[in-house]
Amino acid sequence: MEAGIMAEKDPYQVLGVSKGSTDAEIKRAFRKKARQFHPDRNPGDAGAEAKFKEVQAAYEKVGTSESRREYDQKQQMANMFGGGRGGASFGGMGGGLEDMLGQMFSGGMGGGQFSSRGGNPFGGQAPPRQRQSQTQRPKGSDINVGIDITLEQAEEGGTFSFTFKRLKSNSIGAMEPKSITMKTKLESGVKHGTIKRLKGQGHDHPEGEAGDVLLTVRIDAGEGRYWEGGLLIQEVQTAYTTLTLGGKVEVKLPSGKVGLLKVPANTKIGDRRRMSKAGLQGGDLDLEFVLLETEKLTKEQKKALEALKDTGL
């Protein structure tokens, strides 16, 4: 890396979410981070101001379904092309397109100059390591796409639309990026993280068949919840005194039922309690203790905290 050039930060890491998070979860994470580092809450704190700007920049990249789709697919293209050399983004596929396609299409295209108008790039027979058997045709690359649905939609199933970009061969054999909108049917009770393979809907190959689309289902877990792989996590906001001394806290489960959860003394932030079959669609649910944030303290609370401060707490 050249001096003075810093690696671009992953917006998902900046926002504290996974790439499999739903759009709604990303928005909630942004709001939480923005409140935490907002200049009004941190007057004169240059570090907090820098974090606030960083969070804003990250949200601009993945905060909407359209911007997120663009970012994800640019990253996918960059990974395929060894770090994005040659202008890997869809917005600038002019210079370096031939080289990029040569890397992208493994079936008889690598190692030589690629003509976007078709034809054998080697002027005859492909090198031995690139030859394809009579029964095996070269294939374009697969495309990873996410589709966000609500819990109600997951339970009911139905037909849903999604949009993505693919490289498509035109009438003269040149490869061009195209925006594609498709519909797919999801069965009732579909699980979060389910991957549906759509044959032949991926990137075209100039000398073979198209790749596939790998469609990942992302179910919005709702406010205060998030996914960790296939496991649903629900945050339980708990006061510091309850965490330290023990007590009970009210919890509303995904089913809508409300109950009191016992909190043992000396519970730490991040500790979890698992509830079998209490999650979405009969799955398990992990209850994670987080500190209850108080926006504004009363005079009595301030006085009590001052007294605690004097005791060393």
Image (tube, helix red, strand yellow):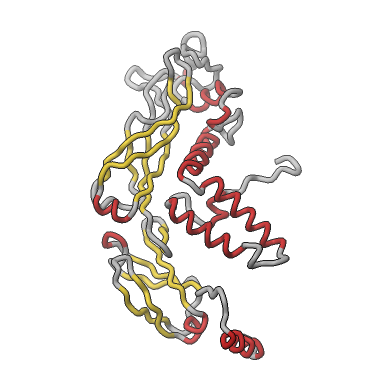
Name the residue at 45% across, 85% down. Answer: 246
Name the residue at 42% across, 52% down. Answer: 22
Identity of the residue furthest to the top in this view: 124
Task: Please name whichever residue, 284 or 11, is drawn nearer the observer in this view of the structure.
Answer: 11
x and y, in percent, of residue 89 in the image: 55, 33
Left or right of 75 on screen, residue 23: left
Residue 182 occupies quadrant: top left
Task: Please name whichever residue, 25 or 276, is drawn nearer the observer in this view of the structure.
Answer: 25
Q: Quadrant of the N terminus?
A: top right
x and y, in percent, of residue 268 in the image: 50, 76
Left or right of 67 on screen, residue 147: left
- Tag count: 0
Identity of the residue furthest to the right in this view: 3
Task: Please name whichever residue, 46 or 235, is drawn nearer the observer in this view of the structure.
Answer: 46
x and y, in percent, of residue 301 in the image: 57, 85
Q: Quadrant of the C terminus?
A: bottom right
x and y, in percent, of residue 270 in the image: 48, 71
State whether residue 217 is above or below residue 118. Answer: below
State whether residue 172 is above or below residue 85. Answer: above
Task: Please name whichever residue, 136 or 176, is drawn nearer the observer in this view of the structure.
Answer: 176
State whether residue 174 is above or below residue 85. Answer: above
Name the residue at 31% across, 37% down. Answer: 183
Name the residue at 37% across, 50% down. Answer: 218
